[in-house]
Amino acid sequence: MARRRLNGEGSIFKRKDGRWVGVVQVGYENGRRSRKVVYGATKSEVANKTRDILENARKGLVRPGRSPRLDEFLNQWLQTIEGTIRTSTFVSYATIARKHLVPSLGPVSLDRLTIQDVAGLLAQKRKEGLSPRTVQYILFIFRGALNKAMRWGAVSRNVALLVDPPRVAHRDVNVLSPDEALRLMAAAREDRLEGLWVLALSTGLRRGELRGLQWADTDLDRRRMRRKNALRPGNAHGLVLKRTQTRRGRRTRCPPHRNR
């Protein structure tokens, strides 16, 4: 099939096996053109990937020549997502990358990263005593980072997608019985945080949401409370007040009436 040019810097074409391929020029090394190759199931998918590569090449995020090491790429990736997601989410991503991914696989070039490397990392973390849920989260972040690497043209496939996550055993949630709830409220009486315990028990709000409540969120006459904000960790500013993520999360609640 004829190749479609991309502003003189590359082309998109379909292979005999049905896959689409994009070839993009990202600069020069030692006087020779350096190109990145991406693959996809459709022409539009490859076109989106090639546009991302060109844009990031102009920003200096995609360099000609050698494939970046994993630790180099993860640092770039974290820089690009900072400020685009919740601070607490970014902090957890950065912690996983720097505590688990970089020490184990940091020196490995992206184009040499294998399925066995990823599977071995997960197995090692299980031997270190991490829970299946934590190991599953490590794989989730690894997959997300390598998806971005694919869009940048740094790798042609995401090897982390080919590794099965560990199975997480289902755990029943333990809740207080009515008698236990009454005993808790009786024990909290006259405590300086009595109101907090009563709200937590009667509304089911999370800790950050409870700490983020303000007088403007309450209507004492109608006995209504609007959950709009939550107190969450910030990067360098301690705790910060942020709006809850979804409209559903900002629904109105009516705590039950409590007679003293």
Image (spheres, grey):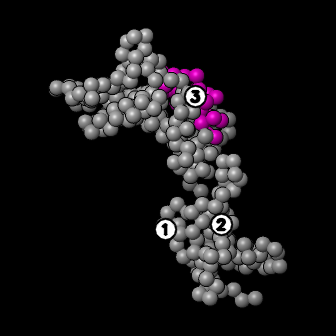
Disc 1 marks which amino acid?
A: Arg
Q: Amino acid at mark 2?
A: Gly
Answer whether labels 1 and 2 touch (C-beta < 8 Å): no
Distance between the alpha carbons at the discs numbered 3 and 2: 36 Å
Q: Which residue is mark 3?
A: 71
CA separation in Å, label 1 and label 2: 17 Å
Gap between marks 1 and 3 measured at Cα? 38 Å
* Screen quadrant of the C terminus: bottom right
Give the label on residue 141, or none. Answer: none
Which sits earlier in the primary sequence, circle 1 or circle 3?
Answer: 3
Decide: is 233 above or below 229. Answer: above
Residue 100 in the magenta stretch? The answer is yes
Q: Is residue 194 visible?
A: yes
Residue 251 in the figure: left or right of residue 27:
right
Element type where label 2 sits in the image: loop
Which residue is the site of mark 2? 212
Instruction: Identify the residue shown where x is 45% and y is 36%.
Output: 148
Residue 156 horizontal/vertical position (percent):
38, 28
- The one nearer the camera, 70 or 185, is 70
**Residue at 59% across / 87% down in the picture?**
222
Say which quarter of the image contains residue 4: top left
Residue 13 in view, yes or no: no
Q: Nearer the viewer, residue 26 or 159?
A: 26
Q: Is residue 209 above or below residue 28?
A: below
In terms of secondary structure, where does tag 1 sit? helix
- Crowding at dot 2, Cα within 10 Å, few <14 / some 14-19 / many 20+, comes out as many
Q: Which residues are magenta?
A: 95-119
Q: Which residue is mark 1?
A: 248
Q: Amino acid at mark 3?
A: Asp
Discs 1/2, front: 2
Residue 122 vs residue 154: left or right? right
